[in-house]
Image (cartoon, rainbow, N blue to C red):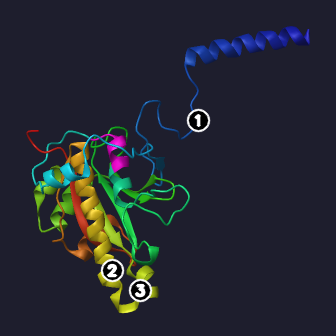
């Protein structure tokens, strides 16, 4: 009798489950949707170490571009850009990265400013990059591209690009070893990272520009940066308009 009741209950449960469709965990995003949760971490696709463009050709083609289409990027492109800037280039050591750093102290922090529908599968917001895990974490929500352009002397062309990379730093990491010369070394490193991004953009068929004219204080507020972090460069990235 008990076995028969169990069978009837189980059959009823299966019928109800089929009628309701797939069961989804509470708080999880709908299947196929973009998660909007703050603090979300996304592991980026594995970057490619080979491409179709030589270093020499990339150097020859490199240009500053200030006119972008709104064609979205994909996560593979975002992965390559962040890896070229600060990615770990040897799995055996976190001290070997894409750009050299005085004393291997790595004072730089990278932030991705993403607009709505700017990167396929990525929600709008401010994302911080973690080289150790090659991942990004959403630290603020909403499209901040217009605000960043306004903070940058109202250079509104920058807001047309689907994303912007913000290169920032914590001077104290380098100053603990190098004292007053730390700022010089940090600026060297930011320049190296900027050139890497320029060349990676050429390899990916993308364009960029380096912006140094912005209000440090206003941009820090827009991005909700911790007091110890100082923005150094803003680099809008996207497809050149008309390309």
Choose the circle earlier in sequence order: 2 or 1.
Answer: 1
Residue 42 appears at what percent x and percent y? 46, 47
> Residue 25 got which mark?
1
Which segment is the magenta one? 73-80
Q: Viewed as shown, does residue 79 lie left or right of 148?
A: right
| Placement of 216 over or under 196, stated as above or below | below
How busy is the neighbourhood of tag 1: few (under 14 within 10 Å), some, or many (20 plus)? few
Q: Residue furthest bottom?
A: 180
CB contact under 8 Å: marks 3 and 1: no
Quadrant of residue 84 within the rendered picture: bottom left
Give the labeled residue for mark 3: 175
Q: Viewed as shown, does residue 217 lie left or right of 68?
A: right
Is residue 228 magenta-colored? no
Choose the circle earlier in sequence order: 3 or 1.
Answer: 1
Choose the circle earlier in sequence order: 2 or 3.
Answer: 3
> What is the distance, in whole Å, between disc 3 and disc 1 at their CAs?
47 Å
Q: Magenta stretch mostly in which secondary structure?
A: helix
Q: Viewed as shown, does residue 7 lie left or right of 121?
A: right
| Placement of 17 over or under 147, stated as above or below | above
Q: Which one is in front, 192 or 111?
A: 192
> What is the distance, in whole Å, between disc 2 and disc 3 at their CAs?
9 Å
Residue 178 appears at what percent x and percent y? 41, 87
Res 162 seen here: no
Residue at image location 36% in from the left, 41% down from the top: 76
Residue 164 appears at what percent x and percent y? 25, 56
Residue 44 appears at what percent x and percent y? 44, 46
């Amino acid at each position: 009798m008990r076995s028969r009741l169990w069978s009837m209950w189980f059959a009823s449960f299966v019928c109800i489950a089929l009628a309701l469709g797939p069961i989804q965990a509470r708080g999880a995003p709908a299947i196929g949707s973009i998660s909007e949760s703050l603090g979300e971490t996304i592991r980026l696709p594995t970057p490619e170490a080979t491409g179709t463009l030589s270093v020499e050709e990339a150097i020859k083609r490199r240009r500053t571009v200030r006119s972008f289409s709104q064609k979205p990027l994909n996560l593979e492109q975002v992965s390559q850009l962040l890896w070229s800037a600060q990615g770990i280039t040897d799995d055996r050591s976190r001290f070997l990265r894409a750009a050299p750093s005085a004393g291997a102290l790595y004072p730089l922090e990278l932030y991705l400013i993403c607009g709505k529908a700017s990167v396929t599968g990525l929600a709008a917001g401010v994302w911080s990059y973690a080289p150790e895990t090659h991942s990004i974490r959403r630290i603020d929500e909403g499209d901040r591209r217009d605000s960043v352009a306004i903070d940058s002397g109202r250079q509104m062309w920058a807001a047309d690009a689907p994303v912007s990379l913000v290169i920032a730093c914590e001077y104290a990491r380098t100053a603990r070893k190098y004292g007053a010369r730390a700022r010089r070394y940090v600026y060297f490193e930011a320049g190296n990272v900027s050139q890497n991004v320029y060349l990676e953009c050429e390899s990916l068929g993308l364009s960029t520009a380096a912006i140094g004219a912005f209000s440090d204080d206003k941009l820090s507020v827009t991005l909700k940066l911790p007091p110890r972090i100082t923005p150094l460069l803003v680099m809008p990235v996207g497809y050149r308009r008309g390309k």
